[in-house]
Image (cartoon, rainbow, N blue to C red):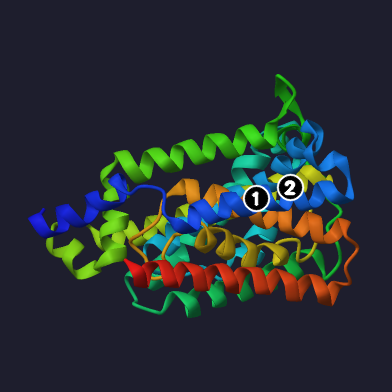
Amino acid sequence: MTAEASQTTRVPLRERPNLPILVSFACIVLLLLVGSLYSSSFLSPDYLIQQLKVASFLGVIATGMMLIILLGQIDLSIPWVVTTGAMMASAATAYGPFGEALAVPFGILCGAAMGLISGVGVAYLRIPAMIVTLAMNVIAQGLMVAYTGGFSPADSASPAMRWLATGTLAFGIPNAILVWAAVGALAVFALTRTTFGRAVYAIGNRESAAYLSGAATQRLVMAAFGISGALAAFGGVLLAGYAGKAAQSMGDAYLLPAIASVVLGGTSILGGRGNYMGTVAGVILVTLLQSILSVMQIAEFGRQIIYGAVIVAMLLLYGRERALR
């Protein structure tokens, strides 16, 4: 590995909390204070744990999206990969105890397979990620509509899916939060302590330099898309367990929040810069914002305007911070 590439890959590991991350956490505190004006329960432990539980589903999905954005790419297949993971995991439960035991890994593997196909298109065929992932989203939608006949699937979530999404393992902490914590810990370890993580940052900064330094850039990009697909499908599995069954288009609500969570946390949309703590802050911020707008009973069009305005404002602040640097 050349000195230039080595220096590039080490920068994110030493990066200190930047302005977007600090602003995200400040906004979280502000939202909780504003919410407490409407109800004192906004600051109660039960409410905070419930919000973290809801955020955990988005957090798992956003983890995969962060990996793709660090590469300087985008994954638009999230909506129906989430739905496919939920539907296929639920479908496996129809095959008795054996199917129930394999429901969760089967759903995740379906998402990983779709992600790998997208990764082949991006890495080896050099199709723009926006095009190939959008096409994969449409293909997944067609396959799921064909499978269900256009109706809600009749299959229910397995007991393991319900336990992961709604159960409690210890100290009253929902399993969903523990699952997100485990996924996040693995992501942090992979991005900061492995060759794979250093190569992801290097590819995001300059793919040609990473390739000349000896990184297997094509295989790494393909693997990253596979991981993103697996995590999106895992998020769908958790959502199906939370709701008790899968539903058509259940992943549609997670594309923009997943991207917004990553970018609001300070990860550069151009790739090569960001850390997972920012994504955690972004996920919590987006979840709280949606919750508070709902509690305030603002009309749907008003929620969309406020939600979009907050995202644009913070992205402008992020751009200003980069310009100052």
Q: What amino acid type should be assigned to the residue bearing mark 1?
A: Ile
Residue 89 appears in the rendering: no
The residue wearing badge 2 is 32
Image position of 247 (left or right of 182): right
Residue drawn at the location 62% of the way across and 32% of the way down: 178
Q: Does residue 242 sit above or below 85 in this rendering?
A: above
Give residue 136's quadrant in the image: bottom right
Question: In the image, residue 115 lies at what x, y percent?
Answer: 49, 61
Q: Kindly state the secondary structure of the residue where label 2 is placed.
A: helix
Q: Are marks 2 and 1 in contact (CB under 8 Å)?
A: yes
**Residue 63 versus residue 19: which sits nearer the camera?**
19
| Residue at mark 2 to residue at mark 1: CA–CA distance | 6 Å
Residue drawn at the location 34% of the way across and 77% of the way down: 126
Question: In the image, residue 21 lies at what x, y percent?
Answer: 49, 53
The residue wearing badge 1 is 28
User: Which image quarter holds the C terminus?
Assistant: bottom left
In the picture, the disc for residue 56 is: none
Question: In the image, residue 210 lies at what x, y percent?
Answer: 20, 62
Mark 2 residue crowding within 10 angstroms, few (<14) / some (14–19) / many (20+): some
Give residue 307's quadrant in the image: bottom right
